[in-house]
Image (tube, helix red, strand yellow):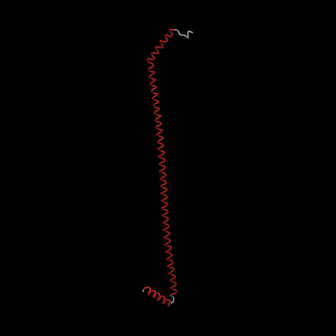
Amino acid sequence: MNLITPSFGMIFWMLIGFGILFFILAKFGWPVILIILANREKFIQNQLEEAEQVRQEMKNLKSEHQQLLTEAKAERDKILSDARKIIEKMNDDAKLRREKETDAMMAETREAIAHEKMKAITEMKNEIAGLSIEVAEKILGEEMKASYRQEEIIYKWMEEATFENS
């Protein structure tokens, strides 16, 4: 039981040793330990603040990225819209140009047809006039074979000429 219950002298010297150790630690160890703990606490606090700043910057960057993405989509939509308008305008211009060319070709064709018609009519008139002259020559040639008939025709023409002049 001696091992379990210490003697009074041993307790005295243990208290004195503990007091000296406590005094030395309180005088030299605790201030250093408290300074180290305070520095460590400041370091951790700074790290947490920096992490918060980084998180906030990431949130801002995400917001900026989202805004840039939205602007890029709007720009893309505007470019596509402009391209569609340009294509529609080009198609309309091409259609108008084709219609004008078609109208011009139709007018030119009508004019050519009218010209050919007039040419055909003129040729027919000339042909008819030529045939009429040939027929008249043949008829007059037949009627003029007899000399008495020639005299009759000349008198008749002279009478007609005198009546017309009077």
Q: Position of residue 105 (x, y in %)?
A: 49, 64
| 130 is higher (above) or lower (below) than 79 | below
| 71 is higher (above) or lower (below) than 156 | above
Which residue lies most toward the front here?
Answer: 166
Which residue lies most toward the left here?
Answer: 166
Q: Position of residue 15 (x, y in %)?
A: 48, 12
Q: Position of residue 49 (x, y in %)?
A: 45, 31
* Count of numbered circles in the view: 0
**Quarter of the picture holding the C terminus:** bottom left
| 128 is higher (above) or lower (below) than 31 | below
| 110 is higher (above) or lower (below) than 160 | above
**Quarter of the picture holding the N terminus:** top right
Q: Nearer the viewer, residue 128 or 89?
A: 89
Which residue lies most toward the bottom here?
Answer: 148
Q: Position of residue 50 (x, y in %)?
A: 45, 31
